Image (tube, rainbow, N blue to C red):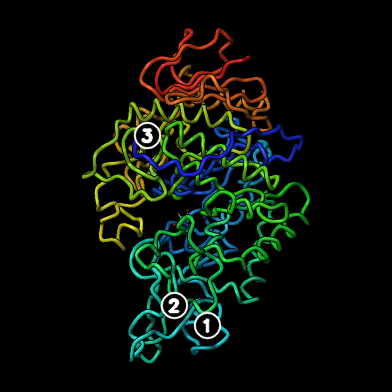
Amino acid sequence: MATQPVEATFPDAKHRASTSTQWWRSAVIYQVYPRSFADSNGDGIGDLPGITSRLEALAYLGIDAIWLSPFMRSPQKDAGYDVSDYQDVDPLFGSLDDFDAMVARAHELGLRVLVDLVPNHTSDQHAWFKLALESAPGSPQRQFYHFKDGRGPNGELPPNNWLSMFGGPAWTRITNPDGTAGQWYCHLFDSSQPDLNWENPEVRQAFEEILRFWLNRGVDGFRVDQPHAMGKAAGLPDHPDIERAGAGFIEGEPSPPMWFQESVHEIFRGWRKILDSYPGERAMCGEAYVLPLEFMALWVRPDEFHQTFNFRYLDCDWQPAMLRQTINESFAAFDSVGAPSTWVLSNHDVVRHASRLGGDYGRPTASNGIGPDDPQPDNELGLRRARGATLFTLALPGSMYLYQGEELGLPEHTSLEPQYRQDPTFFRTKGIRVGRDGARVPLPWQAGTSATNGFNDTGAGWLPQPDVYRQYSRDLQQGVTGSTLELYRTAIALRNQLGLGHGSFEWAEEFVGETSLGFINNGILVVHNFGSEPIALPSKKVLAASFTETDGKLEPNDTVWLRL
Ligand code: NOJ
Ligand code: CA
């Protein structure tokens, strides 16, 4: 495993049980990546009717809510994170009626539904951007985005030194209707994703309407994409350290001009008021890559987001010293504002943890993916560790995010050939970064029923499954003792029965060391073995174990829950 320095030391966490019953404080939220979940019409792309048809499988798993990655109208240059109409479903995924049917069925099954909101940028096919291109520099239409004249004698140089997160400059020059070279527009991601100008009150108002549109359709809340990028420093100055400008946040340094601007907080307060004005407990989770956690906590003050993803935890090496510090920091930061921590191990942007933990791939959110020419993971070891990591994480108080397929123990597709790649990162870096497609492959539902193992009947897939996916198919795991699916299901059910999501936390000192971590939540002792030798366990009742039954010992890479 890559090592990270353990900088400051935080006092050991003591987290008190929550008395609140607000669902999002302890929820297990399952991320559905619509294009790869289930395909009802056989065109190779998952869709909303496909999701509806498989919701019972999610209810079986015992989760509380689903979060859907974007399914709104989009040219799909960044798999839907490039929205051209925020108030419609892309025909690729179905219709608004299909959406309503999906929400109704989810609610019948007791599942809440969060949808993805992408406010930092639109697609370049959005009507606002098309109008801006047709309009003159300085016109109100151009004020929806960040248009600027270029630098250099003929405006041939980008207005500043910012870089795109997907590689290359964060600026693209437009061609005027008369064929001459025009202004530049800012895009922190792909050139097909122009950044919106959040200083413009019309943008703010439009998004409030978008929020209401989905809330009126019955959604339980939002996952908000890149909220830390929405504000830009006045005048769009150069980043002071260009070499690291693309790296996002640099701990301990002043905030970069394109991230973490104070101006965003009043926007979130406005959104919170809108959510609170609806019946039920609507909630929003910010994809705020903000560190350190003390700073992230400001985003979940009682009148802002309900939750943020705890990227510190996702990015943490799976080793005890770093994890211990991360958990301490998490409780210290989030408890200080009365927000729950979230915990997450995988999503559609990082290498699946069943593969990541089977090799040395560095910080997940900075990872470039794993391609056929890279060292390949040991997926057997990875899965064993992943099961241990998941069982450990599911016992932490707070809310847990799962990514579709992790309940099957799915590995990353690490041998995907270049001709299948779709992630703009791959193209913008000329293949140097293979990108995120390996985590986004269609799910195997029924072994051998089609070339996609039941993702659809036709066997078509927008990305091919690796051969090995067949053996992870859901039908081979449902009801099978010891399968990864049943491990998740048992652990989620126990977590609910034992109140762990709302529970308390303190370290179990005798298991906190160089090769293990142990903690106690609501009278349950949870221990993970990071070492290479078995650990002797107290003779207490085993409630859950990530691998073999333990017989008084905890094998390397395993986690156990014991009743004290
Ligand atoms: C974060 C999303 O999770 C990712 O998939 C997307 O590419 C970027 N935001 C840009 O929207
Ligand atoms: Ca389809």
Q: Amino acid at mark 2?
A: Tyr
Of the residues under marks 1 and 3, which one precedes in the sequence?
A: 1
Separation of marks 1 and 2 at Cα, in angstroms: 9 Å
Q: Are marks 1 and 3 in contact (CB under 8 Å)?
A: no
Nearer to the camera, 390 or 424: 390
Q: Residues within 10 Å of mark 3 (few under 14, many from 20)?
A: many
User: Sequence order check: which comes first, mark 3 or mark 2?
Assistant: 2
Give the amino acid type for the residue marked by disc 3 in the picture: Leu
Q: Which residue is mark 1?
A: 142
- Which class describes the residues within 10 Å of circle 2: few (<14), some (14-19), or many (20+)? many
The residue lying at 40 percent from left, 61 percent from top is: 165
Q: Secondary structure at mark 1?
A: helix
Q: Which mark is residue 357?
A: 3
Residue at mark 2: 185
Image spot of residue 315 (x, y percent)? 45, 44
Tell me the tag on residue 158: none
Q: CA distance from mark 3 to mark 2?
A: 40 Å
